Amino acid sequence: MADSLDTTVGKPDYTALTFPAAPAHRPYVILNMVESLDGRATIEGNERGLGSTVDQGLMRELRVHADVVVNGASTLRASGTSPRLGNTALEAIRLERGKSRAPYGAVLSQSGDLPLDRMFFTSPEFQAYVYLSSTADEERRAALEATGRGVVVVPDGDEVRSMLAHMRTELDASLALVEGGPTLNGALLEAGFVDEVFVTLGPVLVGGRDPLTIIHQQRERSTDGTRHLELLHAHANPDTNEVYLRYRLVPGSSPA
Ligand SMILES: NC(=O)c1ccc[n+]([C@@H]2O[C@H](COP(=O)([O-])OP(=O)(O)OC[C@H]3O[C@@H](n4cnc5c(N)ncnc54)[C@H](OP(=O)(O)O)[C@@H]3O)[C@@H](O)[C@H]2O)c1
């Protein structure tokens, strides 16, 4: 457990959080996910129904701190993604702190098969980048570039490291907020690039076979793949029956 564990009852204030400095070669990386009491990251193919409006508000409060909000391509295809805060009071906090109104949006894709009509590509309210694996075909790359969004080709097999390095050096990003999905989370965790995990535990049991949990990897888990975390805060909200948790990866439990 952390030296000063913060526990309260009610809705926490995520705008007041602070984060450690970023390493030189990548942003500090935090994951934010909602899951059911039985550990599921989706109901009927997306996360709707797992978290309350309070949980969604906390997601926006975390964006106050972020320089870039990152998603995997399947989440963009399933739910649409956007880094907007959607709240003028939260935007004002960013502006007061010398940040842009919204963080950069970012999506990582291997295929380049992305829905170009979604807000991620069309909104003038934020800037966004697609990190595209070098294995994607030229035609898809050209279509993505034609949207006007930045397209950064990242080497096959080194996508996540290369994406984070670009964010740090070219976007001057200190804090990357990763909002899933589980496959992107799994790739980041495997590469040792996850610093913290924020989880909202929703008061639902979803059931069924082969759950998609908040970390998903194609390979079988290895015995040395277990990561250990320390609890930084736990807030129980009797109004929503949700629990809001913040964990930090224990230094040394992660290869990078
Ligand atoms: N509970 C929650 O808080 C939460 C949050 C977010 C999403 N979700 C749900 O999670 C589901 C989607 O999750 P998912 O795990 O299937 O997908 P995902 O992580 O959103 O996206 C996976 C895709 O991202 C790209 N990608 C990921 N890692 C990569 C790497 N190392 N190199 C290159 N490309 C990489 C690939 O894109 P291509 O497919 O383009 O090749 C891959 O297929 C949706 O149902 C969504 O609603 C839940």
Image (spheres, helix red, strand yellow):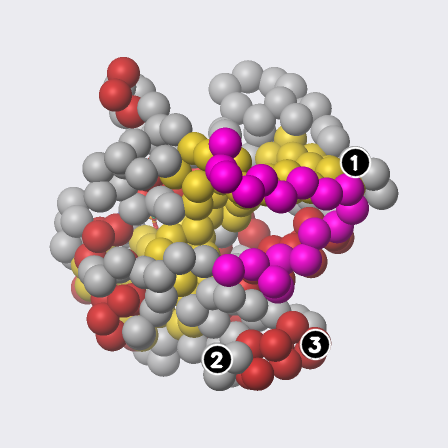
**42 in relation to 15, above or below:** above
Q: Is 48 one of the magenta-colored residues?
A: no
- At 26% across and 35% down in the image, what residue appears? 252
Rendering coords of residue 194 (x, y %) = 35, 45
Say whether residue 137 is left or right of residue 15: left
Q: Could you say whether the residue bearing mark 2 is in a helix, strand or loop?
A: loop
Which quarter of the rendered image does ligand 1 occupy? top left
For the residues marked 1 and 2, what is the alpha-carbon distance in whole angstroms?
33 Å
Rendering coords of residue 215 (x, y %) = 43, 33
Is label 3 in contact with label 1 (beta carbons under 8 Å)?
Answer: no
Rendering coords of residue 78 (x, y %) = 53, 48
Is label 1 in contact with label 2 (beta carbons under 8 Å)?
Answer: no
Q: Which residue is mark 2?
A: 99
Q: Could you say whether the residue bearing mark 3 is in a helix, strand or loop?
A: helix
Q: Amino acid at mark 2?
A: Lys
Task: Decide: few, some or many residues near mark 3? Use Cα within 10 Å; few <14, some 14-19, many ≥20.
Answer: few
Q: Which residue is mark 1?
A: 241
For the residues marked 2 and 3, what is the alpha-carbon distance in whole angstroms?
14 Å
Q: Could you say whether the residue bearing mark 1 is in a helix, strand or loop?
A: loop
Task: Decide: few, some or many residues near mark 1? Use Cα within 10 Å; few <14, some 14-19, many ≥20.
Answer: few
Q: Which region shows up in magenta?
A: 1-18
Mark earlier in primary sequence (1, 2) = 2
Q: Which residue is mark 3?
A: 89
